[in-house]
Amino acid sequence: MDTGPVNNGVERGRIDEFFVRFNQPVDHIKSEFIVKRGNDVIEVLQPRFKTQPDVLYAERSPLPPGDYTLVWTVRALDGQQIAVGQIAFKSESQR
């Protein structure tokens, strides 16, 4: 599995794209990303449909500096929940 941002990573500059790659095709319509800061939900993102079958991908406006968690829920094409996971990351302004 590949992710962006990376788990426990520090991202410098513009953070506005999120992706998680899986080992099988996923249902882009029934899967979701949740961007959190602490316990607060910043935004719920619907992954784009026009991407690789095994990749969830979404965009949003750039995040301000801070500590965040990207929570993802993914479903297989048959509707079964495959997994729920989270990626902790820090956004820093570019220097």
Image (spheres, rainbow, N blue to C red):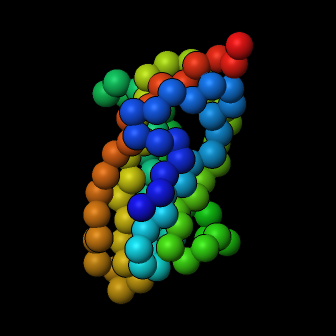
In the image as oriented, which residue stretches furthest toward the bottom?
A: 78
- The quarter in which the N terminus is drawn is bottom left
Q: Residue at x 28, y 63 (%)?
A: 83
Give the image quarter of residue 65. top right
Reply above or below: 78 against 76. Answer: below
Q: Nearer the viewer, residue 80 or 14?
A: 14
Q: Residue at x 61, y 73 (%)?
A: 52
Q: Nearer the viewer, residue 77 or 10?
A: 10
**x then y, percent, for residue 61:** 68, 36
Reply above or below: 90 against 3. Answer: above
Residue 83 appears in the rendering: yes
**x then y, percent, for residue 33:** 45, 51
- The quarter in which the C terminus is drawn is top right
**x then y, percent, for residue 93:** 65, 17
Residue 46 appears in the rendering: no
**x then y, percent, for residue 6:** 47, 42
